[in-house]
Image: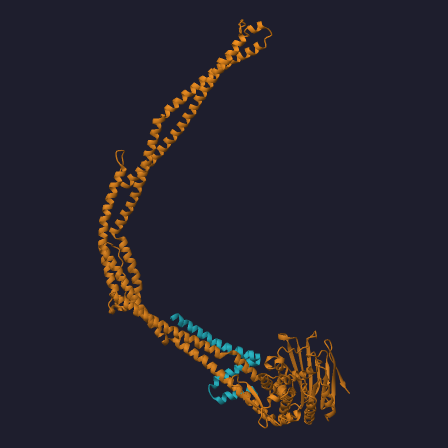
Amino acid sequence: MSYEDRVPQQIEDIGQQVANRMALWEAIAKSFEENGADGVEDELVHRMADVREKFDDVLAKLERML
Amino acid sequence: MFELARLKARGFRGFAGEREFEFDKPVVILFGENHRGKSSTLNAVEWCLFGDQCVGKKTGIPERLDWEVPNRHMPDRVVAVEAEFKSSDGTCVVRREMTGTGRRAAGTVTLTLPDGTRLDGDDAERRLNAVFRSSFRDFMTTVYQHQEAIRAILTAEPRERNDAIDRLLGLSEYRELLKGIRAAELEKAQRTMDSEFEHFRTRVKDRIDTYEKETKEQKSRAMAEGIPEVDITEEGALRWAKKILEVIHSLAQDLHVADFQVAEPHSYDEILEFREWAKNQTDNLWARSPDVEKQETLAKEQRHLATLKGNYEAANARETNAQQERDAFVRENGDEPTLAKRAADEQTRVSELDEEMREVNRRAKLVDEAIGYLRGAPTDTAMQRCPLCFNEVPNLLAHLEKEWEEKISKEVAELQRQREAHSSEIGRLDTLRGQLAKLEKDLDEARSDMKTCVSQVASVLGREIGKEDDPGALMNTSLAEIASELERIGQAIEEKRPRIRGVYDQLAKLRRIDETVNYEKKRAVVERLWETEEFAALDEIRDEAARLVEDVQAIRGCLAAASREEAENKIEAAGTALDENFRRMTNHPAIPGLVMEVTEDTRSGLNSYAFRSKEGTDPTRILSQGDLNCLALSLFLGLASATRDTQPFAFLMLDDPAQSLGSEAKQQLVGVLEDVAAWRKLIVSTPDDELRELLMANITKSKAVYDFVEWTKTDGPEIVRAP
């Protein structure tokens, strides 16, 4: 068994947020296959950047309401 | 199980032209100095089977970054590697080719099965996986011992050694995955967002406090200004607006302003607009009231008349002065006709003198010529005879010389003096006439200015001004009347001013109420921020970030756990062989046996390996470089041994296995390899003469040796198979 099999098994074993974490893991594994550690970093940074962008938009709206 | 039978390589890494190897003996030794193509031969087998999987950063092997597959010295950059594997079912031939480099690289793979079926491309790749049932990861941990794996384990740095052992165990990918996750620094990004959120919360709280403080202060001032507390509300503001409107309306009527526009506010939102309107309306009412308009008109008239009076007085003074100067001049020097007559008389006298001069000159010439003649007369008789009348005159020359001396020269001098005196008088009279002309001109101009000024005064006063009238007095009378009227109007205006001040005062109070209410409203808006959709959305986004971090942390934990689990499984599987091989190779008196354990580095989530002797002591500090080399080989051979029954490949490839071993350890290694050769074909690459000799002398299976004699850029390795 390699990491491709073991990690999903671990996620299943934890039993929390399985669907979300499995989807996230698949994205990480795919990025890794394509671009190694840099790919993983890019994938996660991109995901957090999406959240950050939404955060900035809403915060800017609230700032304007001040 | 598949044995490696044959290999052809062209253009791959150190290879230039095609080279062929036959692995037809149980033990094949690749021997030669470093950089002669030995490792390229073993790498070619790996690349032929796994292609791009064994290239680049995704392998987790530092040396495979920027790893060039084509030989950089070959102009065509065409790579072809063909490996032949024999099994009980027959022979499989794998051929992998590549043209171009970098992003332009294009590869093809062909698989020929024992029954002669030939597959290409993706079909060939899929069938390769199915036939050999081995991943690149398994291959490098149980079939192919990379020389770099031993080199890496020799480091004294624990983190790098852990990395090297992970690699030996085929766990580099876990390590790379964890590295990528760690590098993303999601926790840091989440902390930044939390910090910004908290900063925003603090600012909101501060703003509420500020508005509250301002409200209190404004309210306190309002009450001090006499505004009842009950009026400091939106309704109160509307009531005040209505009152102000009534006062302005009444004022407009009193001021007789007919076109007064009413704009009563119907809601609090209109108060600000009302305040501006009321201020403008009051200003306009005041400016447009008849008294104020009359006051402004009279004041303007007063200013104009005062200016005109000043101008008149200046013109009058200028005319008087000009008149006086001109009269004084005439009194002293006479008027223009007098001066002209005197000048003409003088000119006549000059002409007469000129005539007299001419007469004297004529006579003088005759006397002069006579004197000259007489002085040259040849005889006394001739000297007594007048050359003009021919009469005889005694002592004529003396008489003429006396006349010249005493009469003519004095007369001429007197005539010249008189002429000069009269000429000078003519010049003086001309100058006086010029001065008089200038004075006359100045007087004319002063009179003209005066006339213009009087005309203006007549226009302003609205009446004709005759010679008998005194414009200055007329203006004084008019100015006195204006001043009197202004005083009367001023009193009337002063009586109304308090009412205007009252309106402005009311407006100031309305402004105070408005500002106080506004601060209260702003505070209420900010206080309600917590209940807005936007704030709820912000909370949700923060939750989303927290979930992402939590999920990634969970995955990171899963990776760490899986990596540790796999490491434990492999160490357990290799355990007996690992211990036995290590003891045999090192023959270390202080380490009777070796146990390898794996734990998690809680900070990084990476595997951390520890060794202990079977007696429980920590041998790390006494492990030499050679011991670590033996450890790496023991681990590899242990893993190979653990998978010997399930492994699809019936051969092992060891690249420079004895790089840090002493002579005794090399002998022990050969002893271990003698045992391994019983169940696996061995391909050993080494630059070490001693190891070669030991292998040749002590391995009982038949052997073949490929000598890598030379290497050149153009031809690649020169290889000789020893007989």
Letter of the orange chain: B
Between B353 and B58, the residue placed more toward the observer is B353
What's the image's color scheme? by chain
Determine whether, in the image, residue B373 is placed left or right of residue B281.
right
Letter of the cyan chain: A
In the rendered image, residue B676, in percent from the top left (x then y), is placed at: 67, 93
Figure check: B380 above or below B302? above
Figure check: B271 above or below B319? below
Residue pictured at 44% horizontal, 76% vertical:
B195
Determine whether, in the image, residue B308 is placed left or right of residue B608.
left
Residue found farthest to the right: B723
In the rendered image, residue B112, in percent from the top left (x then y), is placed at: 67, 85
In the rendered image, residue B152, in percent from the top left (x then y), is placed at: 62, 83
Q: Count the marks: how many?
A: 0
Determine whether, in the image, residue B606 is placed left or right of residue B497.
right
Q: Tell me the quarter of the picture where residue B85 sits.
A: bottom right
Figure check: B533 above or below B248? below
Q: Quadrant of the N terminus of chain B?
A: bottom right
Q: Tell me the quarter of the picture where residue B573 sits.
A: bottom right
In the rendered image, residue B160, in percent from the top left (x then y), is placed at: 59, 83
Between B408 and B700, the residue placed more toward the observer is B408
Figure check: B407 above or below B163? above
